Image (cartoon, grey):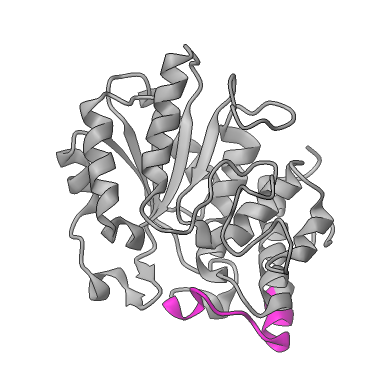
């Protein structure tokens, strides 16, 4: 790798902005906020094999539950080699493999589940983790969820199941940015302490206070990995800033599902240096 993770993240932000701008549709806020995490996950944290197959035997697997942040997911998958980078130019177009929410029927490498119907990803991740155990595969399952997404009840059934069945090869990360489509999570439906809730369901919980700091992410995820295999599932609370890296998008839910205009695109791109080559 002849670039730093910081440079990679900057390019991913450019990809997000350009994809959403082109079709005047998509979800830049949460995508920008999770850029560092997904860059770190796919570049340094997960054990990945060359190529792609749906079984995923012999490697770590990742499941994106909050599928509306597909722009960051597609960018990272393309940039680490799952498909050609220039395919990002087809985002949200008719007959594209890169739909607004990830789908599987078009066979896009890297995508194992359709997501976007919120609250379902943890159930799928648990099933994959159990399959790993049945196959005597020691690799881990990772998943990502929105904090507003936890308002969906199916999550809590899955959270209860994971601890009861000792699913200890699962690391579920919650993007804790405090924002959702209609405003602050505390205004829409307050959830109290998510940390105490997971602990009450007998999970091990790691907090990454600076969830947009690559070094902190790497350190926190290393700790999370060290806790796997100890009889309990692991939750990582990743405290991020929605819209991170683009000043006018930060700290507001307004950019949850809104595309930048031409002037805003230029401003956002100027704040993030091109490092790996635009598509």
**Range covered by the magenta-colored residues:** 253-268
| On screen, residue 82 above or below 180 | above
In the rendered image, the quadrant that contains the C terminus is bottom right
| On screen, residue 6 above or below 61 | below
Q: Residue at x 29, y 48 (%)?
A: 155
Question: Which sits in the foreground, 235 or 134?
Answer: 134
Question: Which sits in the foreground, 162 or 192?
Answer: 162
Question: Which sits in the foreground, 191 or 13?
Answer: 191
Q: Is residue 109 toward the left or the right of residue 34 in the image?
A: right
Q: Give the image location of residue 17, x and y in percent.
A: 67, 71
Magenta stretch containing residue 187, yes or no? no
Q: Determine which quarter of the picture holds residue 227.
A: top left
Q: Give the image location of residue 109, x and y in percent.
A: 70, 42
Q: Residue at x 18, y 38 (%)?
A: 201
Residue ranking furthest to the left? 200
Q: Is residue 273 toward the left or the right of residue 215 in the image?
A: right
Q: Give the image location of residue 244, x and y in percent.
A: 54, 66
Question: Which sits in the foreground, 259 or 224?
Answer: 259
């Amino acid at each position: 790798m002849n670039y730093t993770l910081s440079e990679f993240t900057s390019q991913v932000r450019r990809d997000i902005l350009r994809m959403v701008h082109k079709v005047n549709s998509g979800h830049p806020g949460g995508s920008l906020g999770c850029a560092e995490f997904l860059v770190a996950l796919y570049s340094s944290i997960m054990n990945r094999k060359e190529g792609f197959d749906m079984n995923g035997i012999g490697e770590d697997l990742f499941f994106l539950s909050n599928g509306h942040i597909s722009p960051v997911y597609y960018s990272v998958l393309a940039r680490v080699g799952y498909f050609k980078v220039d395919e990002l130019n087809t985002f949200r177009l008719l007959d594209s493999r890169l739909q607004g929410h990830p789908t599987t029927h078009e066979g896009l490498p890297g995508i194992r589940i359709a997501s976007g119907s919120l609250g379902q990803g943890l159930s799928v991740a648990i099933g994959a983790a159990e399959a790993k155990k049945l196959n005597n595969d020691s690799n881990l399952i990772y998943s990502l969820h929105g904090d507003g997404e936890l308002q969906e009840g199916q999550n809590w059934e899955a959270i209860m199941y994971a601890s009861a069945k000792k699913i200890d090869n699962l690391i579920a990360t919650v993007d804790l940015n405090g924002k959702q489509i209609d405003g602050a999570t505390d205004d829409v439906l307050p959830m109290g302490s998510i940390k105490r809730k997971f602990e009450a369901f007998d999970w091990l919980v790691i907090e990454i206070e600076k969830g947009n700091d690559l070094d902190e992410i790497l350190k926190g995820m290393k700790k999370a990995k060290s806790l796997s295999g100890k009889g309990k599932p692991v939750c990582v609370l990743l405290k991020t800033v929605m819209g991170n890296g683009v000043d006018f998008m930060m700290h507001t839910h307004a950019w949850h599902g809104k595309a930048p205009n031409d002037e805003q695109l230029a401003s956002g791109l100027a704040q993030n240096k091109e490092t790996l080559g635009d598509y």
